[in-house]
Image: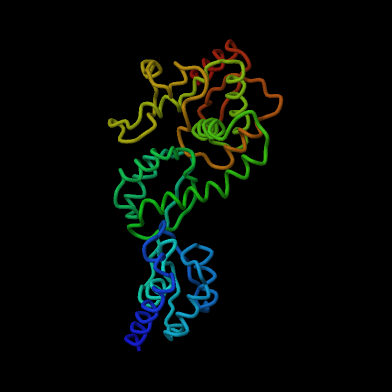
């Protein structure tokens, strides 16, 4: 039975080439993961493949399935295909491949590109950590790799992983940015949101922390945000991690454009990948909030101050406890 299907698909391919299907064999696009539900008909599968841009002509796919007698051989599951494939090749894959075993991975809010790459490699989802980092940085995707729960197959192409995370960003973050008029552009919003993400522990404080940094920015005061210095320092070999646990005075003096203790304005770009709540905090900062300073109070929360004098006294109180 399978031999007959193979021969039928081969014959169909020979017939298709002269009538213009040749383009499909030479112009494959990006990798894409396709979910085929159990019990789906050839027509339903054709629609799914069309929506994922795997095939261009659903009718031809159905004709191939009908003529080859492969309708009952189509498998369900998760398949790793390409955009712009030939229907005959897709049909072969869906009748012979076993699908992809999916691995669950959770990308937390506030991770930087390198942390994401390391975890993906550790889980066996990608093979080359450096490839992920290089591509993401070349495309300036820091801040746009949406933190969420994902399901990928083992040894998934790096380009597909990045594409999937970017699509989630475009689905979850971009609409929020476009919905609210603000003086900041997309990069500035993500930059401020990434700082808030690294500072905040409790959601109710995000709009307040956002207001502090926006207030400082608008009056031309340096942000003096510790996370930007941590980002500039990079990987801390002594601690075997990013985000140095305790900044020293000499750390605040490093000459790096991300060091907001040394340079005015915003850093060149995001320092991490923020979640939706931190982005919303920048878009909707705490109204009529005049604070310019804050300090952690040893519980994960922060105490806010309007003046430097108040701030210094608060710092002394916190340290004394």
Residue placed furthest toward the right: 288
**Front one among 210 and 49:** 49
**Number of dots carrying numbers:** 0
Q: Coloured how?
A: rainbow
Q: Position of residue 251 (x, y in %)?
A: 37, 19
Q: Position of residue 221 (x, y in %)?
A: 56, 15
Say which quadrant the N terminus sits in. Answer: bottom left
Residue placed furthest toward the top: 309
Classify residue 81 by image quadrant: bottom left
Q: Is residue 298 above or below residue 147?
A: above
Q: Is residue 83 above or below residue 247?
A: below
Q: Residue at x 42, y 22 (%)?
A: 257
Classify residue 219 by image quadrant: top right
Q: Position of residue 2 (x, y in %)?
A: 34, 85
Q: Residue at x 48, y 71 (%)?
A: 36
**Front one among 70 and 112:** 70
Q: Position of residue 186 (x, y in %)?
A: 56, 35
Residue placed furthest toward the front: 18
Q: Is residue 33 above or below residue 137?
A: below
Q: Is residue 237 left or right of residue 81?
A: left
Q: Is residue 221 above or below residue 206?
A: above
**Front one among 62 and 130:** 62
Q: Is residue 270 left or right of residue 305?
A: left
Q: Is residue 276 left or right of residue 164?
A: right
**Front one among 240 and 23:** 23
């Amino acid at each position: 039975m399978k031999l007959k299907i193979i021969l039928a698909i081969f014959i169909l391919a020979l017939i298709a080439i002269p009538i213009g299907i040749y383009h499909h064999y030479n112009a494959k696009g990006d990798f894409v993961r396709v979910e085929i539900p159990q019990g789906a008909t050839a027509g339903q599968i054709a629609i799914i493949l069309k929506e994922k841009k795997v095939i261009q002509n659903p009718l031809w796919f159905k004709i191939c399935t009908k003529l080859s007698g492969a309708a009952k051989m189509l498998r369900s599951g998760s398949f790793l295909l390409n955009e712009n494939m030939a229907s005959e090749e897709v049909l072969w894959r869906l009748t012979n491949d076993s699908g992809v075993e999916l691995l669950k991975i959770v990308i937390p809010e506030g991770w930087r590109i390198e942390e994401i790459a390391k975890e993906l490699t550790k889980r066996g989802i990608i093979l080359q950590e450096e490839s992920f980092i290089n591509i993401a940085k070349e495309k300036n995707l820091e801040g746009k790799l949406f933190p969420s729960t994902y399901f990928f197959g083992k040894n998934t192409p790096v380009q597909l992983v990045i594409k999937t995370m970017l699509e989630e960003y475009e689905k979850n973050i971009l609409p929020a940015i476009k919905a609210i008029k603000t003086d900041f552009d997309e990069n500035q919003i993500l930059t401020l949101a990434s700082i808030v993400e690294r500072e905040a522990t409790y959601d109710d404080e995000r709009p307040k922390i956002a207001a502090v940094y926006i207030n400082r920015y608008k009056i031309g005061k340096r942000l003096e945000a510790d996370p930007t210095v941590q980002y500039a320092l990079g990987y801390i070999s002594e601690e075997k991690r990013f985000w140095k646990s305790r900044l020293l005075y000499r750390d605040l003096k490093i000459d790096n454009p991300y060091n907001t203790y040394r340079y005015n304005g915003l850093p060149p770009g995001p320092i991490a990948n923020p979640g939706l709540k931190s982005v919303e905090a920048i878009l909707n900062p705490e109204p009529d909030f005049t604070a310019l300073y804050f300090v952690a109070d040893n519980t994960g929360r922060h105490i806010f101050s309007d003046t430097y004098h108040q701030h210094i006294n608060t710092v002394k109180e916190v340290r004394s406890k």
